[in-house]
Amino acid sequence: MPREPAVAAHLARLQAGLAPWLAPNYRRQAHITLAVAGFPVRCAQQADEVSWAELRQQMQLLKRLNNEPVVCRTSYLSSFAHAPFLAVEVPELVNQWRTLLGAEHREAAHQFRFTPHLTLGVYRYHLALPALERRLKALDHLAPLSFSADLALLGYRPAEFCGRLTRLL
């Protein structure tokens, strides 16, 4: 999670510029998702589930990894179908962390491509692509900003739409 005031201010400006299109009450902190662990269950059967044993293994691995903060840089403004984001350039160490966590294997099964980013919110409704592209282009004019990030296991309450993240490890 970026702690630098300049990055937080930039994210707030982008969110304000997209506010008419964003769902209200988005409280999730800015973060870069390295790998999605899944919802803990006794015996994982669905793609979005992880067994408690697997989760414990990942937690032990995270404890052993070199967790020195890494320097990242903001990049371009873009969008997924459901959410606008600010792309982030990450150092090679981040890709090593992902490999150790087995992220590529899980994502390949879902045809997901890792895009380091900071999510700005989620859309409240379907948007016309040309209007969205114009808005993103109009907002995307700031030089890249550097920020430090550390490795953490974060969780959230699934019943709370876009609620705050809690540091678990």
Image (spheres, rainbow, N blue to C red):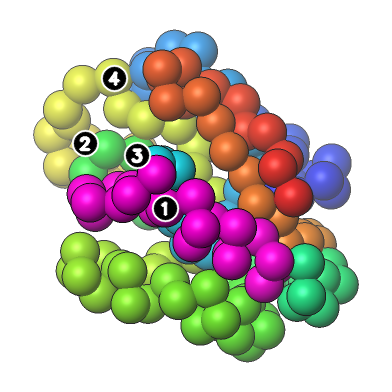
Q: Residues within 10 Å of mark 2 (few under 14, many from 20)?
A: few
Helix, strand or loop at label 4? It is loop
- Residue 45 on the magenta segment: yes
Q: Is residue 104 left or right of residue 13?
A: left
* Cβ atoms at labels 4 and 1 below 8 Å apart: no
Q: Earlier in the sequence, mark 4 or mark 1?
A: 1
The percent position of residue 146, horizontal first and vertical second, equals 76, 64
Whether residue 138 is visible here, answered yes or no, is no
104 versus 29 height, above or below: below
- Residue 112 on the magenta segment: no
Q: Is residue 42 left or right of residue 35?
A: left
Q: Is residue 108 left or right of residue 67?
A: left
Helix, strand or loop at label 2? It is helix
Q: Residue at the spot x=32%, y=69% of the render? A: 106
Between label 4 and label 1, give the one nearer the viewer. 1
Per the rendered image, the range of residues in magenta is: 42-62
Q: Earlier in the sequence, mark 2 or mark 1?
A: 1
Q: Quote the CA–CA distance across marks 4 and 2.
A: 15 Å
The residue under label 4 is 124
The residue under label 3 is 83
